[in-house]
């Protein structure tokens, strides 16, 4: 098994992983800190990518080019689109798509990248199955797999939530996953996105986000740790 890239969306996630890593070396590249070391018997490179698709794309390419990772696992929080999802539930990506790619004025369907062969980027079946097996060990947590939608906007509108779910088939919505997926696709690098639901993406959530990020970070750690042991 080659190196595995671990991208966290939140500082809390990186801080949860780091104490468990050994033989850690720290590097900075393009404004992001990368931690290379051992975790649960695997050679990993860990980083926090920052918010938005550009940050996520830069981190992903650096992991592949500079550190030679052969698989990428991305974790973070998301807004639920599927009506059966509750706050704290887990979504494992089967594929990712950009919901804010909109060239409908030129006759392209929403989400389609003009002149590109692929606009929906499939996740690695092996990594999806490993994530599902690991997440099912968490007590009292719903787990759903499906399409993760990404865009450079925070979705908090019920009408948009319905459209993203019904028209684009999204299970959840966030701001980075499809960028990771696209970079992995063009580099033939397997990936999976794992998201904890922080809200219903409609502005209705009443959650202490500080407390939730700690809970989400712990769940992300447990899922990824289980995956690393099984890969």
Image (cartoon, rainbow, N blue to C red):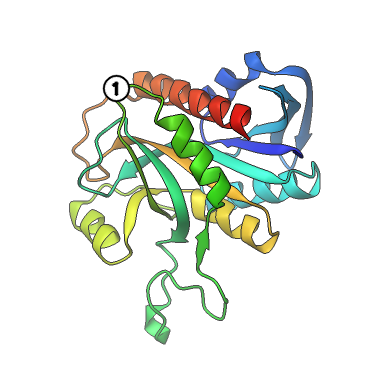
16 relative to 107 in the view: left or right:
right
Instruction: Name the element at disc 1.
Output: loop
93 relative to 228 in the view: left or right:
left
For the N terminus, which image quadrant? top right
In this view, the residue in front, 226 or 74, is 226
In the depicted structure, whether residue 42 falls above or below residue 75: above
Residue 137 in which image quadrant: top left
In the depicted structure, whether residue 153 falls above or below residue 27: below
20 relative to 147 in the view: left or right:
right
Question: What percent of the width, then of the height, locates residue 13?
Answer: 53, 25
In the depicted structure, whether residue 111 falls above or below residue 150: below
In this view, the residue in front, 136 or 7, is 136
Query: Which residue corresponds to mark 1?
Result: 208
Residue 118 in which image quadrant: bottom right
x 44%, y 24%: residue = 219
In this view, the residue in front, 53 or 88, is 88
x 56%, y 81%: residue = 115
x 57%, y 76%: residue = 116
Question: What percent of the width, then of the height, locates residue 6?
Answer: 63, 35
x 43%, y 43%: residue = 92
Alpha-carbon neighbours of circle 1 within 10 Å: few (<14), some, or many (≥20)?
Answer: few
């Amino acid at each position: 098994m080659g190196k595995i890239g671990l991208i966290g969306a939140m500082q809390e996630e990186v801080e949860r992983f780091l104490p468990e890593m050994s033989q850690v070396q720290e590097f900075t590249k393009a404004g992001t800190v990368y931690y290379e070391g051992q975790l649960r018997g695997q050679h990993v490179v860990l980083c926090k990518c920052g918010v938005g698709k550009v940050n996520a794309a830069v981190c992903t390419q650096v992991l592949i080019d500079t550190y030679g990772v052969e698989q990428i696992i991305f974790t973070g929080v998301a807004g639920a689109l599927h009506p059966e999802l509750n706050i704290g539930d887990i979504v494992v990506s089967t594929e990712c798509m950009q919901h804010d790619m909109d060239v409908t004025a030129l006759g392209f369907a929403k989400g389609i990248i003009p002149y590109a062969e692929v606009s929906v980027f499939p996740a690695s079946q092996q990594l999806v199955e490993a994530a599902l097996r690991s997440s099912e060990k968490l007590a009292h947590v719903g787990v759903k797999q499906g399409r993760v939608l990404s865009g450079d906007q925070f979705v908090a509108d019920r009408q948009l939530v319905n459209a993203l779910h019904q028209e684009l088939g999204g299970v959840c919505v966030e701001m980075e996953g499809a960028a990771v997926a696209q970079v992995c696709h063009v580099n033939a690098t397997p990936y999976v996105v794992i998201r904890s639901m922080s809200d219903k993406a409609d502005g209705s959530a009443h959650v202490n986000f500080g407390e939730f990020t700690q809970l989400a970070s712990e769940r992300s750690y447990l899922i990824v740790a289980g995956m690393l042991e099984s890969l």
